[in-house]
Image: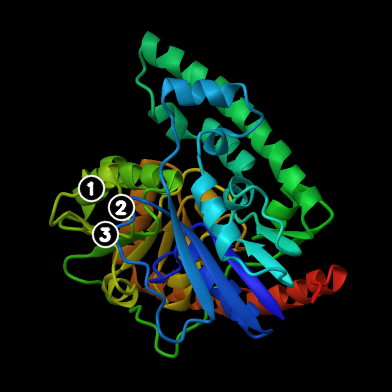
Amino acid sequence: MRSLVIAQEFPWPLTSGSLLRLDTVMSALADLGEVELFSVVNARREAPCIVPDGAPVSRSATATFRDGDYSPMGRAAWAVSRLPLELGTLDLSEPAAQLADWARPPYDVVWFSKAMTYVGLGRANLGPAVVDLDDLEDHKILARLRSDAFADAYPPTPSGRLHRGGAAIQGRHNAQRWSRIQRQISGEVEAVVVCSEVDQERLGVHNSWIVPNGYDAPAEPVGKPAVNTPPVLLFQGLLPYAPNTDGAKWLVNDVLPLLRQRVPGVELRLVGAVSAPIRRLAHPPEVRVTGRVPAMLPELAKADIVTVPVRYGSGTRVKILEAFAHRIPVVSTTPGAEGLGAEHGRHLLLADTAQSFADACEELLTDVGLRVTLTEAAHQLLIERHQWTRARTVIKDMALAVARQQPAER
């Protein structure tokens, strides 16, 4: 069996949930046969794209693209198109041409890691296709419009209210376009993938499969009941991703000042790919912005709490499962923990205002018994429901079903 994975990022190093998910997909497909990888990478990426030894791919290539054109002219072009804003302003014609020259079809399965990659590359017809809708973009947009994050983005002035109203109209229009195109994709390909039953119900199509996010429990978790001096909070991920950028700003500007009134000296580490707005949050030693790191384990070993201040989004967060696996207490917003089956006060603490988030962090930094109780229950939830082995099984079953449904011609 030959598979092609078309990824909207280079998978390594494995420093975010989306990259861990992508690595799991490639590993599962490699159990069935040969896997080739075509990565489409933003030209702003600074790290080299080097496939590590032992990676489950037999052949790979990388193409670059530039940020979408969000100028008034670019937005005008989007307005007359039928595409979502993120697609209508993006030019992937060069990567599409590179893919056409590089690929060696037919493949038994072609796995697209994102809807944007599938559509932006011209719906490349290289074999039976699977598109991973790990984020439902329409739901993410509407969730943002309903969240405090949207209100906070505009000043409480007449001009600010005017701009907010215009942005809300554009957002609802864009969500409608994403909803339509997600359904179009579902009708064009053999299967689409979501992260949870919640998203499967939202999408509402007949050919969706649930590939749950996961994390394999380590033999030696790095979490500990005792708290460091000074205490350390961790927020990790692809920080330029809009929900993470908003969450980092909210954590630094609104939550931390309240927490430091009660827990002086507490430090926050922002770990992962960064952008200019994230770099501006750095204020060492209170707030350290590390950028990409070679491996997450040392950062997890430093952390007393994994924070997930995500105020809107879709899909499920691997960073929570990673913390569960390493027995590190978690404080999350309700949207941040959606779809995982984790309960407030049993597996983690949930908080949706700056004050309640700071209170939850203080509680977990001062109550060792609570730290132990939550992390033990969370670790058990991970073992029962969220091992990557479960996702690998679903991926292989789906790939075989897709290949049998429309086998590649030899």
Residue identifier under label 3: 291
Work out which residue is located at the far top of the displayed protein and give it.
158
Residue identifier under label 2: 274
Task: Report x, y in % for residue 111.
Answer: 65, 64
Kindly check if marks 2 and 1 are in contact, taking CB atoms under 8 A apart as contact.
yes
Identify the secondary structure beneath mark 2. loop
Q: Amino acid at mark 3?
A: Gly
First of labels 2, 1 by sequence position: 2
Task: Report x, y in % for residue 397.
Answer: 76, 77
Closest to the observer, 128 or 182: 128
Q: Mark 2 and mark 3: span between their CA atoms?
A: 6 Å
Work out which residue is located at the far left of the displayed protein and give it.
285
Q: Amino acid at mark 2?
A: Val
Residue visible at 83% across and 72% down in the picture? 407
Q: Mark 3 and mark 1: span between their CA atoms?
A: 9 Å
Q: Residue 300 appears in which quarter of the rendering?
A: bottom left
> In the picture, which quadrant includes the C terminus?
bottom right
Please tell me the numbered disc located at residue 279.
1
Query: Taking 114 as reference, is 402 above or below it?
Result: below
Closest to the observer, 271 or 400: 400
